[in-house]
Image (cartoon, rainbow, N blue to C red):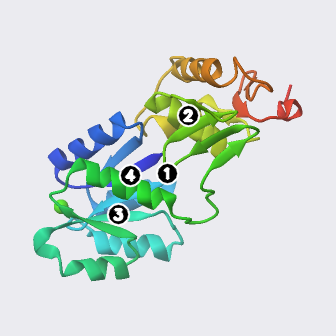
């Protein structure tokens, strides 16, 4: 899950980014409304966490502008307790939910899970290829009905591949989704995660689902014929 956090207070932004990072989310941060819109013009996010009071353009304005542009990404708006009256306006501007500051991190996680469950467009509840399933609401992965335990980053890589099943993704595409916007690496980190996913998901099962497309990237498919040679 790729999340944009728009928050002008560095401490809160860092708190959210660190916590979500540990949960396996890829987090980018923007510190004012203009920067948020610039980011959103070039990057795709699964969820936006949007503070209400921001320099340059406030949360309402950012949200209205997004919706005007047809961007339907779920928005969780952060408001201070003293701004309770603004909640209605927040929802009117196109936010999907709001959270009062200060909040417990667990509650933020619960709201994000709820938002990602919503059928925004055509997002299926459970992702599936052959007998491999991933339930985003429960963060649960199974192969042949057997529960598979994945580390947070393994889960994120798999979720991306499943959302694009049958489609080859480059290492850079995988890296930018799973790590953050600033992530740059010539390392083989993506390959390392693919290897551990293969061990857990493919080694004991048939057919093999995780395929390498030489010189390009990876593909999740049950049909060998999807693999370009
Ligand atoms: Ca603020």
From the image, state whether disc 1 or disc 4 is nearer to you.
1
Residue on which disc 3 sits: 76
* Residue displayed at 28% across by 37% down: 18
Where residue 4 is drawn, which disc sits there?
Answer: 4
- Distance Cα–Cα, label 3 vs label 1: 17 Å
- Distance Cα–Cα, label 4 vs label 2: 18 Å
* Residue displayed at 14% across by 58% down: 102
Query: Residue 208, can we see it?
Result: yes
Name the N-terminal-most of marks 2 and 1: 1
Query: Residue 176, can we see it?
Result: no
Q: Residues within 10 Å of mark 1 (few under 14, many from 20)?
A: some
Residue on which disc 2 sits: 157
Q: Nearer the viewer, residue 101 or 36?
A: 101
- Distance Cα–Cα, label 3 vs label 4: 10 Å
Mark 4–mark 2 CB contact (< 8 Å)? no
- Distance Cα–Cα, label 1 vs label 4: 20 Å
Name the N-terminal-most of marks 3 and 1: 3
Q: At numbered mark 1, what does the secondary structure look like: helix, strand or loop?
A: loop
> In this rendering, would 221 be left or right of 79?
right
On whether ligand 1 comes within 8 Å of the CB at mark 1, the answer is no
- Distance Cα–Cα, label 2 vs label 1: 16 Å
From the image, state whether disc 2 or disc 1 is nearer to you.
1
Q: At numbered mark 3, what does the secondary structure look like: helix, strand or loop?
A: strand
Where residue 137 is drawn, which disc sits there?
Answer: 1
């Amino acid at each position: 899950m790729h999340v944009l956090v728009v928050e002008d207070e560095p401490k809160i932004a860092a708190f959210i980014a660190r916590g979500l990072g540990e949960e396996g989310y890829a987090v980018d941060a923007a510190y004012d409304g203009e920067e948020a819109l610039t980011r959103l013009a070039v990057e795709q996010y699964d969820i936006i966490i949007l503070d209400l009071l921001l320099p340059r353009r406030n949360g309402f304005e950012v949200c209205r502008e997004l919706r005007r542009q047809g961007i339907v990404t779920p928005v969780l708006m952060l408001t201070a307790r003293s701004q309770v009256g603004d909640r209605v306006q927040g929802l009117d501007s196109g936010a999907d939910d709001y959270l009062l500051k200060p909040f417990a991190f667990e509650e933020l996680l619960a709201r994000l899970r709820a938002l990602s469950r919503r059928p925004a467009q055509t997002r299926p509840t459970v992702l599936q290829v052959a007998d491999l399933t991933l339930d985003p609401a429960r963060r649960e992965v199974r192969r042949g009905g057997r529960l598979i335990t994945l580390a947070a980053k393994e889960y994120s890589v798999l979720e991306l591949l499943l959302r694009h099943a049958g489609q080859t993704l480059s290492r850079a595409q995988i890296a930018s989704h799973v790590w953050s916007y600033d992530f740059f690496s010539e390392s083989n980190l993506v390959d390392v995660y693919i290897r551990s996913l293969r061990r857990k998901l493919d080694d004991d099962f048939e057919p093999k689902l995780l395929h390498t497309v030489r010189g390009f990237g990876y593909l999740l498919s049950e049909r060998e014929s999807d693999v370009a040679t």
